[in-house]
Image (spheres, grey):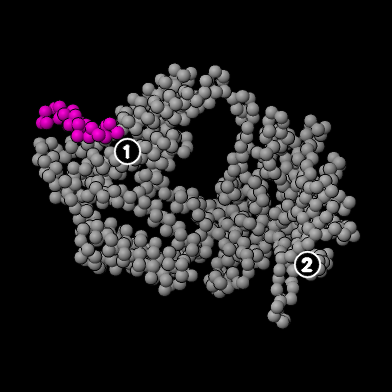
């Protein structure tokens, strides 16, 4: 072992010692790749191009780095090989034997560490190459399928180093296999749970917190196993490869140092390094204390008493369990009382940080000199109907078209696109909310109003940081506060993607009135000049729209189509795509859009006309109706309805009713007092309408009561 061949001798001995792992790995990869590939070759005759292409895609998916089963198998093998390779550290007899050999610890670590990698890497590579050759023999292109297999193997092995080395680190830190597995769980779940608790407390305690993806965004960065898994659902980039190389290098360095410093007498103990015991004890106890506090705090109606009970229950039980694991002795439950008290105090301090907003998160406002730009939008009250996304069209192997709507979130689009011309408007909005909150408290700000409107404000700082806050405002106040922001031209440009459309892109226009659509295109006899003029007029009126005008019920809908959208909107026998696009990207035609309505009228397209009563067979009428209670003097409210067939009543209803699908376009609209209708037409179709609150609505409520009593 002291000669230059120490490495190869050591590797040979290690492979002999772990022959069971070699056999298990070989068997697993044999069934994963060659057997599965042979099975794929039997599923079709591959005599036509469609079946052959399907086989090629399936073979590439099997051999690619994104194969779900391969990802799972490699994760399992990382844990098995990591712990089995260094299991000798848990036996005093084996430790004494290996440490008495004239081989430095660094060399022993290198032998065992590399052996574990090779046990996974070699069978994987051999059987992946064999599978690629099987696929090539069945008709797949050899070069393409082999590149897929080799790249999949290389990226998988690079990613494998992260959970594998994490398992080795867990084995180094502990002296018992069961405790080591627990430690591996702590390494993978402690920090994701920490940020999840952080987000939970922020959502429950802070009024302006809106980073709801915080835990999901950070989980893959704080856990070796989550980080490993997160790299397989997207296209591999150079940055991803470098980040995995860097993470693996750091983990390997930590594992090597721990192996060198690990005391020989640690075998059989729960923790190999006494210095790590208090840190791990305090960290885990604190986290469980916060978890218990949050659980009982919510269960008990957010009472401080229940919060304290949950804190004590979670912290004390966790501390006792850790002491039992550390010492394997029930008598040691409270042998570190001071650390337990410190953990409980730390957990309560963590809770207090959010509950009393010690950091001033809710009252924070940027200085105007530090802010580069800002954006603001109401999440539900105004313009929540806007669709954000991209239409994608492609062709299958048989030439048939298919499509997909790739949705973009509202928050992402507005964060990227909206820049208010007057950034101080966003600051003033937030300042008004904060001043009211500071003066009267949150309950007074909210009052008894329900529901509230959520307005999100985005600050872009000059240092490159983006800060988001959300303010809950009673609906009767938010309209006044939001008015100036809505009138800012930067708001419209960032809110409505249609304002970015140019005349060169325009290929068609589709108008909808109460579900009946009209298509304008060159094929239908409309000139490009007519459609371009319509786009220009609509964009101008949309840009000049006031908040009050946007609260009116539209008279119709319109959408402007480029080449792809025109194909999707029309659909053909070979391109059944209309369902993919559906009713997306329609914009409202408000009564204030008189120039747009006039231009449509010149093209013989009418919007806003009342419904013809002769086309109506019957109307189902329903609304909230006040009735006398069983108790004298009390009034009860019931949701009641009846079917109207009287022709005179139907004529009056038809003259007043509005199309219900347009309600979503009304900014900060209140329709709670309206009477809702289900209109059955003579052609046996039906649509939803409503009668606005007023004289006719009151008359209908009386008819509801009269018919219900009858």
Q: Position of residue 174 (x, y in %)?
A: 23, 50
Task: Report x, y in % for residue 658.
Answer: 79, 56
Residue at numbered disc 1: 77
Q: In this rendering, would 7 be left or right of 121? A: left
Which badge, 1 or 2, comes first in the chain's sequence?
1
Q: What is the distance, in whole Å, between disc 1 and disc 2 at their CAs?
A: 70 Å
Query: Is residue 629 at all visible to an observer of this figure?
Result: yes
The image shows residue 124 at horizontal and vertical percentages of: 34, 29
Verify whether residue 10 appears in magenta. Answer: yes
Residue at the spot 46% in from the left edge and 66% down from the top edge: 298
* Marks 1 & 2, CB-CB < 8 Å contact: no
Q: Secondary structure at mark 1?
A: helix
Locate residue 268 relative to residue 526 in the image: left or right. left
Q: Which residues are magenta?
A: 1-24
Residue identified by numbered label 2: 708
Q: Quadrant of residue 393?
A: top right
Could you tell me which secondary element the residue under label 2 belongs to? Answer: helix
Question: Residue furthest toward the front?
Answer: 710
Image quarter in which the C terminus is found: bottom right
**Front: mark 1 or 2:** 2
Residue density around tag 1, few if under 14, some if 14–19, many if 20 or more, within 10 Å:
many
């Amino acid at each position: 072992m002291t000669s230059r061949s120490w490495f190869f001798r050591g590797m040979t001995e290690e492979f002999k010692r772990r022959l069971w792992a070699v056999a298990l790995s070989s068997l697993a990869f044999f069934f994963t790749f060659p057997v599965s590939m042979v099975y794929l070759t039997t599923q079709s005759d591959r005599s036509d191009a469609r079946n052959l292409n399907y086989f090629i895609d399936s073979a590439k998916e099997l051999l690619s780095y994104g194969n779900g089963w391969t990802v799972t198998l490699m994760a399992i093998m990382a844990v098995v090989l990591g712990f089995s390779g260094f299991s000798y550290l848990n036996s005093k007899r084996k430790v004494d034997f290996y440490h008495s050999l004239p081989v430095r610890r660094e060399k022993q670590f290198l032998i065992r560490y590399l052996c574990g990698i090779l046990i996974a890497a070699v069978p994987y590579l051999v059987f992946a190459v064999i599978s690629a050759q099987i696929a090539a023999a069945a008709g797949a292109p050899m070069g393409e399928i082999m590149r897929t297999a080799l790249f999949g193997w290389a990226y998988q092995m690079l990613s494998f180093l992260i959970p594998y080395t994490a398992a080795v680190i867990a084995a180094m830190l502990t002296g018992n296999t069961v405790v080591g597995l627990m430690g591996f769980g702590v390494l993978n779940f402690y920090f994701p749970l920490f940020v999840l608790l952080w987000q939970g407390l922020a959502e429950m305690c802070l009024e302006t917190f809106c980073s709801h993806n915080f835990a999901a965004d950070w989980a893959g960065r704080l856990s070796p196993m989550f980080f490993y898994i997160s790299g397989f659902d997207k296209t591999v980039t150079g940055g991803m490869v470098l980040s995995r190389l860097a993470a693996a290098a750091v983990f390997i360095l930590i594992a090597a140092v721990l192996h060198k410093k690990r005391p020989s007498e640690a075998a059989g103990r729960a923790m190999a390094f006494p210095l790590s015991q208090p840190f791990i004890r305090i960290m885990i106890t604190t986290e469980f204390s916060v978890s218990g506090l949050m659980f009982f705090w919510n269960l008990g109606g957010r009472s401080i008493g229940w919060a304290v009970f949950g804190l004590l229950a979670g912290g004390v039980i966790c501390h006792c369990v850790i002491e039992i694991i550390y010492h394997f002795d029930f008598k040691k439950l409270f042998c570190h009382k001071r650390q337990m008290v410190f953990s409980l105090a730390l957990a309560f301090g963590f809770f207090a940080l959010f509950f009393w907003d010690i950091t001033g998160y809710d009252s924070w406002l940027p200085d105007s000199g530090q802010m580069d730009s800002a954006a603001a939008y109401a999440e539900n009250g105004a313009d929540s109907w806007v669709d954000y996304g991209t239409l994608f069209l492609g062709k299958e192997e048989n030439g048939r078209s298919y499509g997909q709507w790739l949705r973009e979130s509202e928050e992402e689009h507005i964060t990227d696109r909206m820049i208010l011309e007057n950034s101080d408007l966003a600051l003033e909005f937030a300042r008004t909310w904060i001043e009211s909150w500071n003066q009267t408290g949150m309950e007074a700000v909210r009052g008894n109003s329900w529901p509230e409107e959520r307005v999100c404000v985005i600050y872009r700082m000059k240092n490159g940081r983006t800060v988001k806050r959300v303010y809950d405002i009673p609906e009767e106040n938010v309209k006044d506060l939001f008015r100036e922001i809505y009138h800012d031209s930067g708001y419209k440009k960032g809110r409505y993607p249609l304002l970015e459309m140019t005349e060169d892109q325009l290929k068609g226009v589709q108008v909808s009135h109460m579900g009946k659509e009209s298509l304008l295109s060159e094929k239908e006899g409309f000139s490009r000049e007519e459609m371009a003029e319509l786009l220009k007029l609509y964009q101008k009126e949309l840009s000049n729209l006031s908040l009050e005008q946007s609260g009116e019920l539209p008279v119709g809908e319109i959408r402007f189509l480029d080449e792809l959208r025109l194909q999707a909107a029309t659909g053909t026998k070979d391109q059944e795509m209309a369902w993919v696009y559906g009713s997306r990207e329609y914009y409202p035609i408000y009564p204030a859009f008189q120039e747009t309505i006039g231009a449509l009228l010149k093209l013989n397209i009418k919007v806003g006309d009342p419904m013809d009563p002769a086309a109506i067979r019957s109307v189902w009428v329903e609304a909230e109706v006040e009735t006398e209670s069983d108790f004298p003097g009390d009034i009860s409210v019931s949701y009641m309805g009846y079917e109207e067939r009287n022709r005179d009543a139907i004529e009056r209803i038809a003259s007043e009713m509005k199309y219900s699908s347009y309600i979503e376009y009304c900014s900060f609209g209140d329709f709670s007092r309206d009477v809702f209708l289900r209109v059955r037409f003579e052609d046996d179709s039906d649509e939803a309408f409503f009668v606005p609150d007023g004289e006719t609505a009151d008359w209908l409520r009386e008819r509801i009561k009269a018919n219900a009593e009858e």
